[in-house]
Every structure is written in structure tokens, then in C-alpha cells.
Amino acid sequence: MVQLLSTEQMAEFANSGCLFFDGLIDNETNKEFLNDIGHTDIENVDNMQKYFQNIKASSSIPRIPAGTPLKNAYPHKSPLEKIFQNEVVAGAINSLVGSEAVVDHQFLHLTFPTKYFKKTNQRQMSQVNHQDSTIDPRITFDIQLFYFPTDVSKEMGGTRYHPGTHLRIVNEMGIAKYQNIKGQKKIVCKAGTIGIFHNGLWHGAGVNFSDEIRYMFKVRLQPTEKQELLWDPEKKYKPLPNKALYWTDENQEKTVNDILMKSYPWQEADTNRLDKINTIKFWRMLTGNKNLDIDYWLTRIENELY
Amino acid sequence: MTKRQKVLVLYLKFPSLEAEVISWATFDGTGQKLHMTGDSDEPPYPTGLDALLDGWRLFQSSQAIPEYPGEEFRTSYLKHEFFFEKIEEGDF
């Protein structure tokens, strides 16, 4: 039985563009995944490319033609099949991109420690901020699922990401000039953590200053059905009524609308308001309610009498 | 003695130098420090004005471009961009 996301989790995703499930996958499956890719003691790895090529040659991670249904993508009883069959992972996927999602692509990202760059006289640099994979003005969205099979410490340079950037339409590395963005996050997590990003979320890999190799397995999934109330098949969600704005009571109870309207420190004073408008439009799509509004942002500008 | 340029790019909360810094990038032409993406979580200055007060010279800022008709609600790149420089002399 899959565990669908709650309305609060969906609102969190709609607002921030990401969700995390810390240490979700059990240690046995994490070990199985690492054994399968041939993970070994760092002392036995002398060449970055050779190590990577060995993983590609010997692991059970299949070559998946783009557009393959997720349910047929991974070998029976393989660690990756177990991960995708986890009731929380399957529930989150079904809630966001439906039960008939297809694989766009997958990749095992390896980030090597400093000593390998010194040995080959290469400059060790972090990955610049970018948005995958090209300009994407769709309302439909894909998700990118990240799996971390080992603990990721701060020194290991876990994926950097910028919550709330997912609805900004940019052209891939066109955001590379923003070296640092206020409120940026870096993934530090336990083994078995799953992260799910909206395809538009700005992100990049950090530098690995530890002595261990960092692994991150990523799969991009695309829906084949409308992403409307997939998390709420009984259609229990009802928009909240308007509330007083600005001149308000101090102690108002927090609602799902407060999750949706959360601001971030990197947002400009003017464009922050457009980010809110776009989040409401996104929530209209997710809930299938074309007239829904929050804090009067859309009603105000849709009240065109001429 | 030679001269080298250091460049500081600040993105501000609104289009005035008194505004808070929301994003930043530094490129050091002297080679003394290699800056890279994600290398600092705190901005070098609280506002653009603070950078001026510390001797950075402003040489470019973004223009105010009206939103394209029909695309008024599309959000994209950070808007309020300011480029500063410092010229350093030394044996680099």
C-alpha cells in the first residue's frame, strides 16, 4: 500500500520545489546498492575515470531508454527496484507525477575528494548553479528523485539548492553567475535519504573536501497524466475562505495557505509578489480549482471590468 | 608592479544601492583567492552602499526594463544587478 503525500507536504512542494525523506531507505538496501556498484575502500580507488567506468560496466543499473515506464525500468529484486517500491517513495511519486510516470534519464553522480584533483593537477571547483535541463515554460512538471546511499557530511559538499526557485523560468546555466544566493541550502543527510526536486529547482553539486567519495543517484521522472489531485483521489481538499489582509489579528492559526505563501530571503521585494502569484497558479493546477486564490493576489488583478 | 581587477557582483532586493544583498559573486584577478559557487552563506556586505563605503567602485547596474506585454507575471533571473571593481597593485 503506497503512502500518498499529505496536503501539507504537497503545499510544501508547491512552495519550495522540494521534499526530503531523511534516512528513509533501510541500511540493508543501502549496502546492497553500494555492493552492487562495487563501492570499495577509498584506498583501493586510484583513478576517478577508471572507477566510474567499472561501476558502469559491472553494476545492475540498467540502460533505460528515455520514456520507459518506471514500473518496468529496474531489474526484479534489484536495490533500485526496492527503493522505488518503498511505500513512501512510491506514494510521493504517485502524488506528484502519477502511477504511470516514465523515466526521462538517470545518472549516478560521483564527487571525488581533493587528493584525486591534486594528483591529476586539476582545479577542484564546485558545480555552478543551474536549472535542468533547458528553458521549460510548461505548467506540467517533472520531478528529479535523489538517493543518497551513504551519509553525507557537510565536508562532502552535498547538493546545493535554492528553495522557492522552481517556478522561475531561466535557461539552464544562465544562472551560473550567481555564486551565492541568500538562504542557499546544502544537503547534509543520513544514508538512505531521498530528496525530490521539481525539475525547475536551481541547484548544483558542492566540492568534496572529505576523504570519502560522495554518491548520489538521480532519476528524472515525467508524468503521462494531468497532475491534478493525484495525492487526494477522494478530492477532500477544499480551498480556504478569504481572510483579512494586513490589518489582521495577531494570533491567527497557521493553515496550508501559510505554507504556500512562505517567502525566501533571496526573493526581490517586487518579484517576490510575482513568485506568490505563480505559486497560487501552480496550486490551482495541482488542485484543479481554477478560481482558487490566496491573500487576494489573483482576485485583485483578475477583477478586470473593461 | 602590475595592476589587477577584482570584481564584485551584488544582487539587491530592490533597485537602489541602499537595498539588502540577496546574491553575490566575487572574481579575484590578483589570483590571491579562488572564489567558487556556494563558497559563502553570508553576503560580503549587508547592502550595496556598504560596498561603496568599503572602497568598491560601481561600474555597471541593470536597467529597469518594463515587463513584456502578456508576460508580466513571468519570473526569471535576479533583477537588480550591480557590478563593482577594485584595482589592486602588486607583484602578481
Image (spheres, rainbow, N blue to C red):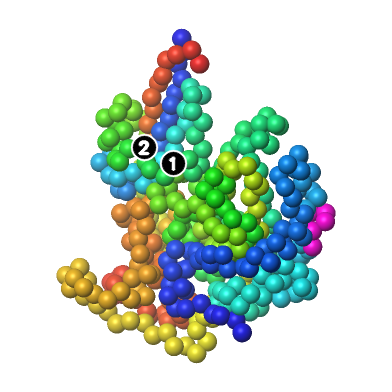
Q: Residue at x 43, y 26 (%)?
A: B6
Magenta stretch encompasses residue A59: yes
Check disc 1: other Cα within 10 Å, few if <14, some if 14-19, many if 20+.
some
Q: Nearer the viewer, residue A256 or A301?
A: A256
Q: Position of residue A184 (x, y in %)?
A: 44, 51
Left or right placement of residue A50 versus residue B6 in this view: right
Q: Residue at x 73, y 41 (%)?
A: A43
Left or right placement of residue B11 versus residue A54 in this view: left
Q: Position of residue A194 (x, y in %)?
A: 58, 64
Amino acid identity at mark 2: Pro
Viewer can see residue A170: no
Snapshot quadrant of residue A267: bottom left
Task: Give the chain of mark 1.
Answer: B
Residue B40, numbered label: 1
Q: Nearer the viewer, residue B18 or A170?
A: B18
Residue A127, above or below A234: above
Magenta stretch in the rendered image? A56-60
